[in-house]
Image: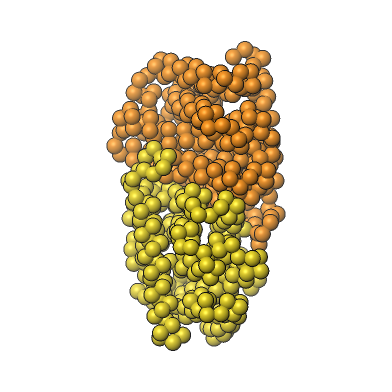
Chain colours: A yellow, B orange
Amino acid sequence: MTDQDTSLFQMTLLHRAAAVEALLTDLLSDQPQDGEISRPPRLMAAMRHGVLNGGKRLRPFLVMESAALFGAGTPAALRVAAALECIHSYSLVHDDLPAMDNDDMRRGQPTVHRKFDEAAAILAGDSLLTYAFELIAAEATELDPGAKVALVTALARAAGIGGMTGGQALDLEAEKVKPDEAGIIRLQAMKTGALIRFACEAGAMIGNANPEDRERLAEYGSAIGLAFQLADDLLDVTADAAHMGKATGKDAAAGKATLVSLHGIDWTKRQLSGLVAQAEELLAPFGEKAALLKQAARFIAERQS
Amino acid sequence: MTDQDTSLFQMTLLHRAAAVEALLTDLLSDQPQDGEISRPPRLMAAMRHGVLNGGKRLRPFLVMESAALFGAGTPAALRVAAALECIHSYSLVHDDLPAMDNDDMRRGQPTVHRKFDEAAAILAGDSLLTYAFELIAAEATELDPGAKVALVTALARAAGIGGMTGGQALDLEAEKVKPDEAGIIRLQAMKTGALIRFACEAGAMIGNANPEDRERLAEYGSAIGLAFQLADDLLDVTADAAHMGKATGKDAAAGKATLVSLHGIDWTKRQLSGLVAQAEELLAPFGEKAALLKQAARFIAERQS
């Protein structure tokens, strides 16, 4: 990336992040909304702590830029993006729990169960997960019911048994029996890949893309999802904790098999270049309109935190 | 209730329970389904242990009987009923965790985190919650998209911040600051009432009922939801653990304020009779067709376990 590309991409990422954070701040206020009897202030504070934590908002960016590729207006894409960020955030809140990864810090802040308590973290995660579906079904008002049903279905599949939670379950089992290469790839495609793939496919769905383009965006999502995980595994080996805002070297310490531990750092870097090239090729038919999504692929592969 | 009424109601309850359990057994098999990469066997086993546990399936019964009141066919109602049971079951799995109620037994069986482990129980709960929305959006194929969106919205609201998880959060706070009577009623309307109200309203939605009838069913659901909680609080005082299949006397031991602790056993029994009369009055316009739903109200108020 040239410096100019970088700065346009970084600016847009910040701009999209600000929009999704403003919406979530509004939606997750203490004020009871349509049809609600009451909103417990401590639950809402725990939910906000889990979501409004300075994340990069990469998934929301992907939803919104993918939708923009098909000329879809901002409000519906923003709401689906916010719903996806609720799902991503809930998974981090539960993942950090003592019974799971037992992490005290995330992005330089105490995790939800450290700041509040375990019960609050469990309920805040459950509430964020539930709210994501309400957000798509009730708030994305410009979408027709058919599009909403397709999005709810795709999100539930990406987040559930055959996607994220299934991948997390495989990850727990991998601590006992080390998976082979195919097993690692499957685990990662489910655990982190499925939501990133959904982000890109959702944009195409919101934009009412034809089936071929929708599949193209989904494939782009798969490529950058794998790149995301490879970059993450690489960072776990090479970065220091201060830079990451969380503990590093945990995979190696846990004896966890990753593609990096299997094939080494140089192989991983070559793979990452290959995935960026693949992502760019998938986006080639969209020409200049897809410039930011191409830069996103590069950013994901080269990120330092 | 006459003995004959009782036996017709009990038979129908068992019949509906068998249908929803057969469907859930099928849906929660180890076999990957449409669009899924893989289903981790241990996660599926934990989910099945959490759901297929010999529950009475009262909420599914209410969905199906309410739908039948409006002539709605069984398949869609059965799927929405199964989705609701997934939500109810996930809430029990998470509620039993050490950080929440810390229960070792449920219905005479070890709880999910005792049978498996805490991480499996957290993930199984998350997966059941997520799957409920997939089930409505993807599997209830006879419903039009508009009905599905309305059901997803209503279920997410009943299960989330302004409903069940919000009520659970209020319940945790009630351990520190005792709520007054209005506070107890609000807490219970959210924690247990919202899902029971949803069950009855969902039946009307599936049956495409007019707004007045939909509201009538929702109100019936609110009345029996409150009766359910009063009967539960009464049982906590009067029943023994062997009968309930779980620990009893916990509310009193925890110094927890309930309407029973506030007003006594006799007042509670009079309230229960009043709620049954109210439920019957709400169903009066439907005549004989609503006989089983009237018996359900009586069953809920008089149940011994």
Nearest the viewer among B129 and B137 is: B137
Identified at 49% across, 73% down, the residue is: A232
Left or right of A20 in this view: B146: right
Q: Position of residue B111 (x, y in %)?
A: 54, 42
Nearest the viewer among A216 and B241 is: A216
Identified at 38% across, 33% down, the residue is: B186
Q: Quadrant of residue B191?
A: top left
From where the camera sits, is residue A54 visible?
yes
Nearest the viewer among A178 and B169 is: B169
Q: Position of residue B149 (x, y in %)?
A: 56, 46
Q: Is residue B120 above or below residue B268?
A: below
From where the camera sits, is residue B55 visible?
no
Nearest the viewer among B142 and B117 is: B142
Q: Is residue B249 above or below residue B129?
A: above
Residue projecting furthest to the top: B2
Q: Is residue A105 above or below residue A268?
A: above
Q: Position of residue A109 (x, y in %)?
A: 33, 63
Q: Position of residue B49 (x, y in %)?
A: 60, 44
Identified at 52% across, 67% down, the residue is: A71
Residue projecting furthest to the left: B177
Q: Quadrant of the C terminus of chain B?
A: top right
Q: Quadrant of the N terminus of chain B?
A: top right
Left or right of A28 in this view: B105: right
Q: Quadrant of residue B142?
A: top right
Tell how many labels. 0
